[in-house]
Image (cartoon, helix red, strand yellow):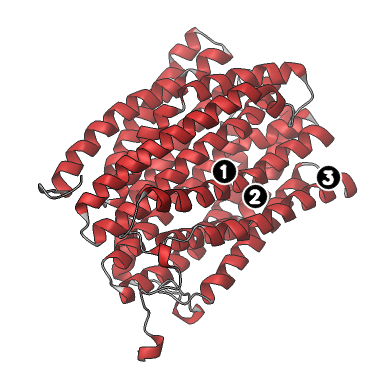
Amino acid sequence: MKSADRPSITTKHRDTDLTRGSILDKVLLFAIPLALTSMLQQLFNAADVAVLGKFASANAMAAVGSNAPVVSLLVNSFVGLSIGANVVIARNIGAKHPERASKAVHTAMALALICGVVVAVLGNLVARPIITLLGVPEEVFGYSLKYLRIYFTGMPFIMLYNFEASIFRSNGNTKTPLICLTVGGVLNVAANLFFVLVMGMDVEGVAIATVLANAVSSMLLLYYLRREESVIRVELRNIRIHRPALVNIVRIGVPSALQSMVFSISNLCVQSAVNSLGPDVMAASSAAFNVEIFVFFIINAFTQTCVTFVGQNYGAKEYARCRLIVRRILMASWCVTMVASITIILTQRMLLGLFTDDPAIIELGTVRVSVLMYSETLNVFMDNLSGALRGLGKSLIPAIVTFIGVCGTRITWVFTGFRIYHSWLSLMLVFPVSWGISAAIIIIMYIKTRNKLLPVNDQDPA
């Protein structure tokens, strides 16, 4: 390799070095664009629900909501794998190993393309059995099947975007993915209105609009990755699997993927219980989900920040700084989550009204929003400490905690407590209960892992 072609750690953005300087301002500069990116990504689905709720039918609106756990199951599983890429690239950047980082970047791109095609093919093959398994009512079944099959067809673009965004995050850049997704978001809303109002489509129109928006966003990110002047620059001819990089990505990413899969399986179980309560509750749950999920995105932004910051600093052997980073992120995440939760509680009826004009559905929606918002701060500890453990390379621990505390609790509740107290409120209580159990376990596991992997001395600020 010629010296001119050799990847370099140096970038033109000084704030991408996360191993030096003050922590809190860099955390906020990193987390805020990331939160906005996730929120905008969710607006793709929120726009689908809102357009269908206002201009189509309640059944079409319910169909999109009934598919949310299915989409999350497959998408989040591979997004979990992209976290492995994030950690591996970030640690190599922190350890000043540019060639290893570059190989990890190109391996991540190849992995994204492979995963996207596999999910698209398999998803279309199993779409009907999945909808049947969920117990979707007959009047909603056809809508759900159409939406899910079109959504699966666009999975290569969705996977590519998420891996590309993960590559940018590993180098401290969360602004570029936000810009690209903003362009896609504007296109998505415009296409939704065009296909539904002008072309007379229903769920297939909003599904096609979402696929187009994701395609544009992923291609824009690829354009910027090819123009990068740092170690994360992508050369199309170099996109292939490098075995050592793949092994490291899989070692960290597979447990994260399994954690996301287990989490989504538990939500599938909850969604099946929601479906048993009828189309109105399904529609209310869909609308409420698109309101309360924005607080989760705030927490998740700080979680991804924790993964990247801890990953870079652990690679640089800045152990005391790793400890301090976790404390700062927990503090910032808790404060922002509290403010956001209170704001949504006070405005929930107005927000739910953006998705439906039906007073009964709005009333049912307030049950989900209220229960989750009053307990969302439990997620701060569960998710952020999980992110810290992944940054340290201990991805299996949060996966096991999620399996026991989240999946185990929710499935047990659905088949016991919910059957005894068959109500909308009793079903929603499973969320704070599972979060509380998981948070308690993950705090204990983080402290044990921190004491082992992050030694400090008397001179360290941590």
For mark 1, what is the residue?
Answer: 71
Residue 182 visible to an observer of this rendering: yes
Q: Earlier in the sequence, mark 3 or mark 2?
A: 2
Left or right: where does residue 138 sit relative to residue 6?
right
Residue at 52% x, 40% y: name it. 297
Q: Is residue 399 above or below residue 135?
A: below
Are circles 1 and 2 on residues that touch, CB within 8 Å?
yes
Q: Residue furthest top?
A: 420
Task: Name the element at disc 2.
Answer: helix
Identity, as a three-letter code, of the amino acid under mark 2:
Tyr
Identity, as a three-letter code, of the amino acid under mark 3:
Val
Identity, as a three-letter code, of the amino acid under mark 1:
Val
Left or right: where does residue 382 sit relative to residue 58?
left
Residue at 43% x, 44% y: name it. 302
Gap between marks 1 and 2, in whole Å?
A: 8 Å
Position of the C terminus by quadrant = top left
Residue at 70% x, 20% y: name it. 362
| Residue 35 percent coordinates (x, y) | 52, 46
Badge 1 crowding class, 10 Å Cα cut-off, few under 14, some 14 to 19, many 20 or more, is some
| Residue 13 percent coordinates (x, y) | 45, 68
Q: Residue furthest bottom?
A: 2
For mark 3, what is the residue?
Answer: 196
Residue 262 visible to an observer of this rendering: no
**38 and 431: which one is in front?**
38
Residue at 57% x, 37% y: name it. 294
Gap between marks 1 and 3, in whole Å?
A: 22 Å
